[in-house]
Image (spheres, rainbow, N blue to C red):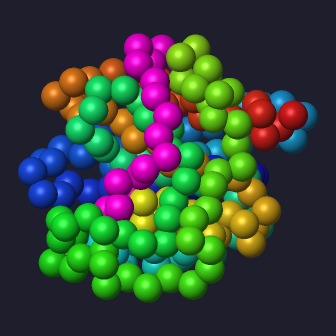
């Protein structure tokens, strides 16, 4: 069966309940699509908020899933209220906040281009989120310079080699919208993405 890797993060800093990780956990095993190419199964992974460990765990998950991976969608929480689609990930991480291991992104040195961009049409992705029930949707060219941008870059790097799409979606904090309120939006978005991949 083809799979979609969905990642989220553990709690960090003052985020004691990280909806991105809760969503990845809740949607693990969900079946999407059912078109000509068959169902697509979500495989959810909760990643550590750690510059060194998170990319390794993403790579391990992709290796485990093998050739059937159809897309990588990574989730993270931001401070704002919209569901926010990220256009690109850079190779330099300038956030002054340490990760859960006490490391700073400035210590990360990456090879390759200074930035990578998703191959998905973000206008279409925005529409999918709205159709799935998102009250607010925005797009951004700055993924934040922290773990969200680091894992997006890792996902885009891996996706290029696998010739599949990768995307990062920032979700709102639970103080604005509960995990149970976010889950149908994210699931509906993934359903639309699955139909697109099947087409």
Up the image or down, 85 lies above or below 106; here it is above
Residue 144 on the magenta span: yes
Q: Quadrant of residue 59?
A: bottom right
Q: Residue furthest left?
A: 14
Q: Residue 126 at what x, y percent from top left?
A: 58, 26
* Residue at the image point whose x is 26% and y is 57% from the top: 10
Front residue of 168/59: it is 168
* Residue at the image point whose x is 48% and y is 14% from the top: 133
Up the image or down, 71 lies above or below 157; here it is above
Q: Residue 135 at what x, y percent from top left?
A: 41, 14
In this rendering, position of residue 65 left or right of residue 98? right
* Residue at the image point whose x is 31% and y is 84% from the top: 107
Up the image or down, 128 lies above or below 156; here it is above
Residue 128 on the magenta span: no
Up the image or down, 23 lies above or below 82; here it is below
In this rendering, position of residue 39 left or right of residue 128? right
Q: Residue 184 at what x, y percent from top left?
A: 46, 23
Q: Quadrant of residue 123?
A: top right
- Quadrant location, the C terminus: top right
Asked whether residue 109 is in view, the answer is yes
* Residue at the image point whose x is 23% and y is 38% from the top: 79
In this rendering, position of residue 37 left or right of residue 111? right
The magenta segment is: 132-148
Asked whether residue 62 is in view, the answer is no
Q: Main secondary structure of the magenta part?
A: loop
Q: Residue furthest right?
A: 36
């Amino acid at each position: 069966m083809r799979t979609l890797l969905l990642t989220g993060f553990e709690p960090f800093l003052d985020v004691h309940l990280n909806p991105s990780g809760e969503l990845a956990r809740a949607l693990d095993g969900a079946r999407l699509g059912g078109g000509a190419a068959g169902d697509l199964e979500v495989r959810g992974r909760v990643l550590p908020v750690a510059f060194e460990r998170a990319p390794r765990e993403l790579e391990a998950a992709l290796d485990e899933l093998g050739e059937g991976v159809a897309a990588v969608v990574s989730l993270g929480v931001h401070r704002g209220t919209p569901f926010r689609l990220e256009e690109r990930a850079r190779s330099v991480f300038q956030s002054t906040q340490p990760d859960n291991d006490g490391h700073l992104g400035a210590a990360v040195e990456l090879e390759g281009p200074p930035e990578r961009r998703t191959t998905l049409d973000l206008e279409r992705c925005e529409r999918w989120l709205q159709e799935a029930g998102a009250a607010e949707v925005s797009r951004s060219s700055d993924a934040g310079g922290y773990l969200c941008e680091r894992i997006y870059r890792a996902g885009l790097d891996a996706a290029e080699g696998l010739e599949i799409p990768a995307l990062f979606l920032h979700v709102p904090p639970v103080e604005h919208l509960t995990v149970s309120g976010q889950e149908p939006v994210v699931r509906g978005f993934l359903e639309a993405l699955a139909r697109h991949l099947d087409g």
